[in-house]
Image: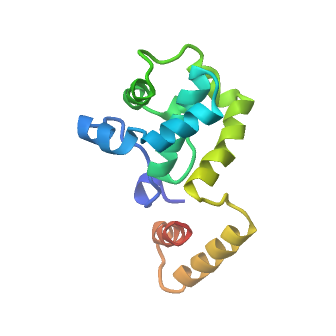
Amino acid sequence: MPAIHETAYPRLKTSVTDKELHEIYTPTSEELALAKRCARTPVARVGLLVLLKTFQRLGYFLLIAQVPHQILRHIATAAGLPTLPAGLDAYDATVIRKRQMPRIRKFLGVTAYGPEARRVMVKAAVEAARTKENLADIVNVVLEELI
């Protein structure tokens, strides 16, 4: 099996520049309004915004524990909080997170993985396997097709 770094599977950088923080991880006014509408507490609001901004970047949901503190702090500040809210580390295990993920998909116009995505994935893998031997190359073709 190829290592993750051998594929086009997107991942976060461990160190982010100020420019990247501003351009990639600063919520828009519409995104801040969504967070205000869908989340009552600071933890839920920051959690939703972190899920949203990292999903936009990666195409999949991360756990808060996987997001560099630099990004977490930036998003919390953009949400109007002076510090990270207490309890954010427990957000990943909450029902709130599970409820927010479909809202984020709907906001972005993205469909969750399901039978249709599986059909597309299998078809792309079979076609790629006809011309490629390296498993990482096949995985990359599948990822591109799903995106």
Instruction: Name which quarter of the figure residue 118 lies in.
Output: bottom right
**In the rendered image, is residue 62 in sight?**
yes
- 119 in relation to 37, above or below: below
Q: Residue at x 54, y 86 (%)?
A: 130
Asked whether 131 or 46 is in front, the reply is 46
Q: How many marks?
A: 0
Instruction: Name which quarter of the figure residue 126 lies in.
Output: bottom right
Can you give x and y, in whole percent of width and height, for residue 134 in the image? Answer: 46, 72
Coloring applied to the structure = rainbow
Q: Residue at x 63, y 21 (%)?
A: 90
Tell me if 139 is positioned left or right of 41 in this view.
left
Instruction: Name which quarter of the figure residue 61 lies in.
Output: top right
Can you give x and y, in whole percent of width and height, for residue 21 in the image? Answer: 32, 37
Can you give x and y, in whole percent of width and height, for residue 67 in the image? Answer: 47, 33
Can you give x and y, in whole percent of width and height, for residue 98 in the image? Answer: 71, 38
Quadrant of the rendering where the N terminus is positioned: bottom right
- 119 in relation to 47, above or below: below
Asked whether 123 or 137 is in front, the reply is 123
**In the rendered image, is residue 63 in sight?**
no
Q: Residue at x 40, y 32 (%)?
A: 71
Asked whether 34 or 25 is in front, the reply is 34
Q: Residue at x 72, y 63 (%)?
A: 114
Asked whether 97 or 109 is in front, the reply is 109
Tell me if 53 is positioned left or right of 107 in this view.
left
Tell me if 57 is positioned left or right of 65 in this view.
left
